[in-house]
């Protein structure tokens, strides 16, 4: 049931206003922090206010302006968009608190916090985009707002990373624009409110071009191989920016866009006939394994995290490409499962860097003895990525494997097994170094970070446990994901 309501617009709009106040009043440390936290907190409250209705099946809609028939800037909070907005706005609160502590003595904090707030508020707007035009406008806004964060340090490496980032993501945006224009020409609409707007009447060749344009364009931000090279380079940015890129916005927007293209532009039935999704599933499976192998070779912590993200985000793409209800459930819930585990790791890496100056895996011997809470949180995230039961990552792998069997594609279960083994191979040695290897002497000078850093670390690690243990609890995030699957597949979709 669609309900006209301004809240899908108000959530990003209020956040944009607060971001503007950061720029206007942000020279004061107090007001910079106040408006940064306010932007995150108010957005989360507005999103949460729509949650009860979403769980009942309500969809909140609001059209801002219509340019021409089929072309408007409009917002729609369906269950899938709500799930993504909940993840992004919740993590925004934690990341803002963490960034205040991490950037305490950094230069250009006004610029950093202003663009940081703009990025996440744009992400919430994308979550509620009713059509491809609204999605595209906000998609490009996110690209531009993230650039000053990638290049924040101003070093030659950062400036080069920024150029590569823009080259990739603006090209991706151009592809999305091409795919959107072709969709409008063929279907006469850009809406994302339907379970597919295209039909076979358009012809297989135009449909193939639209598929390549939309999936390729969104796939750039999702870092699907071979469109991934910008992401490891962007790790020269400060740790909170890495957390933003990997867990809160940017790559998540890419994965979200791919799934919107599959479910709401093409639709399950059309893709099943065309067979395009099968090829995409194999590309995603290759990315999962290849990126994990590259992660094994990285000694720099942030680069290992980057290749892990490339691998993990393709879980979403693989699951969505299987076109089954259980796999779709895995695709949606992994947006949360990966986000909370990965942001925990980024926060830990930043805390280690701030307190000890260490940035490499090989330097972590004995650090778990001086930073037990911090490294304990890292261990929780590592267990989740490996897929140990009771942790969030296990839920993803379980439903993705069931979805693969549901699709008759048992070989993708082997991909999940291989991914788990590779995750163990590049995360468990860090845990072993931290807790079971003697210190090299430098780690003895380490200590737990400040409360502004440690608090978000522990809170996000707790979420990893909660997401793993509350799959069947009514009202928890998985309940929203189940409603989203029903909206995509219809009332006949089997539940978990």
Image (spheres, rainbow, N blue to C red):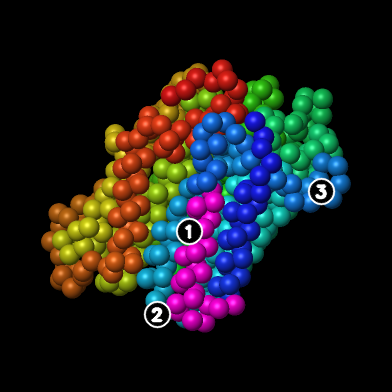
Q: Position of residue 493 (x, y in %)?
A: 54, 20
- Residue designated by label 1: 41
Question: What percent of the width, then of the height, locates residue 420?
Answer: 35, 38
138 vs 104, left or right, is right
Disc assigned to residue 459: none
Q: Which mark is residue 66?
A: 3
> In the picture provided, is 282 more to the left or to the right than 262?
left
Rendering coords of residue 492 (x, y %): 56, 17
Q: Nearer the viewer, mark 3 or mark 2?
A: 3
Q: Nearer the viewer, residue 376 or 283?
A: 376
Please give left or right for residue 432 compared with residue 62 in the image.
left
Residue 42 on the magenta segment: yes
Which residues are the magenta region? 24-47
At 41% from the left edge and 37% from the top edge, which residue is drawn? 476
User: Mark 3 or mark 2: which comes first in sequence?
Assistant: 3
Residue 3 visible, this angle: yes
The quarter of the image holding the C terminus is top left
Q: CA distance from mark 1 to mark 2?
A: 24 Å
Label 3 close to label 2 by CB (< 8 Å)? no
Spatial separation of the CA atoms under disc 3 and disc 2? 46 Å
Inspect this view and state whether residue 283 appears: no
| Residue of label 2 | 105
- Mark 2 is surrounded, within 10 Å at the Cα level, by few (under 14), some (14 to 19) or many (20 or more) other residues, namely few
Seen in the picture, residue 432 relative to 406 is either above or below; the reply is: below
Instruction: Kindly state the secondary structure of the residue where label 1 is placed.
Output: helix
Quick check: marks 1 and 3 in contact, CB under 8 Å? no
Which secondary structure is most common in the magenta stretch?
Answer: helix
């Amino acid at each position: 049931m669609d309900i006209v309501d301004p809240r899908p617009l108000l959530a990003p709009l209020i956040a944009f206003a607060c971001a503007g106040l950061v720029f206007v009043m942000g020279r004061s440390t107090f007001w910079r922090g106040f408006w940064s936290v306010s932007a995150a907190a108010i957005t989360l409250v507005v999103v949460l206010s729509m949650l009860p209705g979403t769980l009942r099946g309500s969809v909140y809609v609001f059209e801002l302006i219509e340019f021409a028939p089929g072309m408007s800037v409009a917002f729609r909070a369906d269950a899938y968009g709500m799930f993504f907005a909940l993840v992004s706005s919740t993590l925004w609160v934690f990341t803002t608190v963490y960034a205040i502590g991490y950037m305490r003595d950094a230069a250009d904090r006004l610029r950093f916090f202003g663009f940081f707030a703009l990025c996440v508020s744009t992400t919430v707007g994308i979550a509620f985009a009713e059509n491809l035009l609204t999605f595209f406008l906000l998609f490009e806004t996110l690209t531009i707002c993230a650039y000053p964060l990638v290049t924040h340090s101003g070093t030659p490496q950062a400036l080069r990373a920024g150029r590569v980032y823009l080259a990739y993501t603006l090209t991706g945006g151009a592809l999305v624009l091409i795919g959107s224009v072709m969709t409008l020409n063929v279907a006469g609409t850009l809406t994302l409110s339907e379970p597919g707007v295209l039909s076979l009447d358009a012809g297989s060749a135009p449909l193939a071009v639209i598929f390549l344009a939309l999936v390729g364009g969104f796939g750039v931000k999702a870092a699907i191989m071979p469109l991934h090279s910008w992401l490891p380079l962007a790790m020269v940015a400060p740790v909170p920016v890495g957390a933003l890129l990997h867990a809160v916005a940017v790559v998540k927007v890419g994965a979200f866009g791919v799934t919107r293209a599959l479910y709401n532009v093409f639709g399950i039935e059309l893709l099943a006939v065309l067979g395009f999704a099968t090829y995409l599933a194999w590309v995603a499976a290759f990315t999962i394994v290849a990126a994990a192998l590259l992660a094994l070779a990285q000694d720099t912590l942030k680069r290992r995290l980057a290749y892990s993200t490339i691998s993990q985000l393709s879980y979403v793409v693989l699951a969505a490409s299987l076109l089954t209800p259980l796999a779709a459930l895995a695709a949606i819930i992994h947006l949360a499962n990966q986000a909370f585990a990965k942001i925990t790791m980024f926060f830990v890496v930043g805390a280690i860097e701030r307190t000890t100056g260490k940035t490499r895996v090989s330097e972590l011997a004995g650090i778990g003895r001086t930073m037990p809470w911090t490294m304990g949180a890292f261990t929780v995230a590592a267990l989740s990525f490996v897929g140990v039961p009771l942790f969030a990552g296990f839920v993803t792998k379980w439903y993705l494997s069931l979805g693969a069997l549901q699709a008759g594609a048992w070989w993708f279960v082997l991909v999940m097994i291989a991914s788990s083994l590779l995750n163990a191979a590049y995360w468990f040695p860090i845990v072993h170094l931290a807790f079971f290897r003697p210190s090299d002497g430098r780690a003895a000078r380490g200590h737990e970070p400040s409360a502004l850093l440690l608090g978000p670390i522990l809170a996000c690690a707790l979420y990893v446990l909660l997401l793993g243990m509350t799959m069947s609890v009514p009202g928890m995030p998985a309940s929203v994901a189940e409603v989203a699957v029903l909206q995509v597949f219809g009332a006949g979709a089997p539940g978990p």
